[in-house]
Image: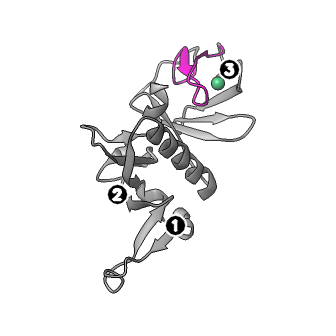
Amino acid sequence: MTSIPSDYPIFGTEIRCPQCHQPIPALLLTDSYICPKHGAFEANPNTGELIHVQSGRCWHQWEGQWYRQHIHPDTLRFEIAEALEHLYQNGYRATQVIVAQRYKEMLGNSLEHHADWFEQFCFVKQRLYGVPVEFSPDQHTEPRWKIMNFEFQTEPGNPTNYTYPFLKAWR
Ligand SMILES: [Zn+2]
């Protein structure tokens, strides 16, 4: 297969900045996008990654949304905390957080192990900020989990699960 060389980076002439969600332009004949607030982002045509040049933070896109790819449990936990706060402010309570399988090992030690007295001989529940944690299906079964980080089940319920950063789009 041959691809037609383009004057623009792989994501086109304009993207939404993954940090502030404002439309930001591509620089012609480069792989870069420039946000007036956040500086340069570089698109990698081979991996589909978008890298924030200054911080090295990395995002992947799934159905038009950017998902930060975490390499440290603290940044993932912070993103979950921020999303929980946002849910709470909008009148929802998270009853479960489903975290991508690919973070299982990384997140492992930072989860609170909580044993209910009547269940302590059966299994130990894992929690994060008091919310029960499950891990997603394998990314080969559900490819979105290759890129997405987590989603919530909430009360009151909603026809669709809450997936960050869709929450941000509501702001
Ligand atoms: Zn920005």
Q: Quadrant of ligand 1?
A: top right
Query: Disc 3 designates what residue?
Result: 34
Over which residues does the magenta segment extend? 9-27
Helix, strand or loop under label 2: loop
N-terminal of the two: label 2 or label 1? 1
N-terminal of the two: label 2 or label 3? 3
Helix, strand or loop under label 1: loop
N-terminal of the two: label 3 or label 1? 3
Q: Which mark is residue 138?
A: 2
How many discs appear? 3
* Dots 2, 1 in contact, CB < 8 A: no
Q: Is residue 16 magenta?
A: yes
The residue positioned 52% from the left and 18% from the top of the image is 12
Q: Which residue occupies the foreground of this view, 70 or 91? A: 91
Q: Which residue occupies the foreground of this view, 44 or 107? A: 107
The answer to whether 46 appears left or right of 63 in the picture is: right
* 111 in relation to 46, above or below: below
The residue positioned 48% from the left and 18% from the top of the image is 4
Q: CA distance from mark 3 to mark 1?
A: 37 Å
Relative image position of residue 86 (x, y in whole percent): 49, 38
Relative image position of residue 118 (x, y in whole percent): 31, 81
Amino acid type, label 2: Asp
Amino acid type, label 1: Leu
Q: Which residue occupies the foreground of this view, 117 or 100? A: 117
- Residue 145: in sight, yes or no? yes
Q: CA distance from mark 2 to mark 3?
A: 35 Å
Query: Disc 1 designates what residue?
Result: 111
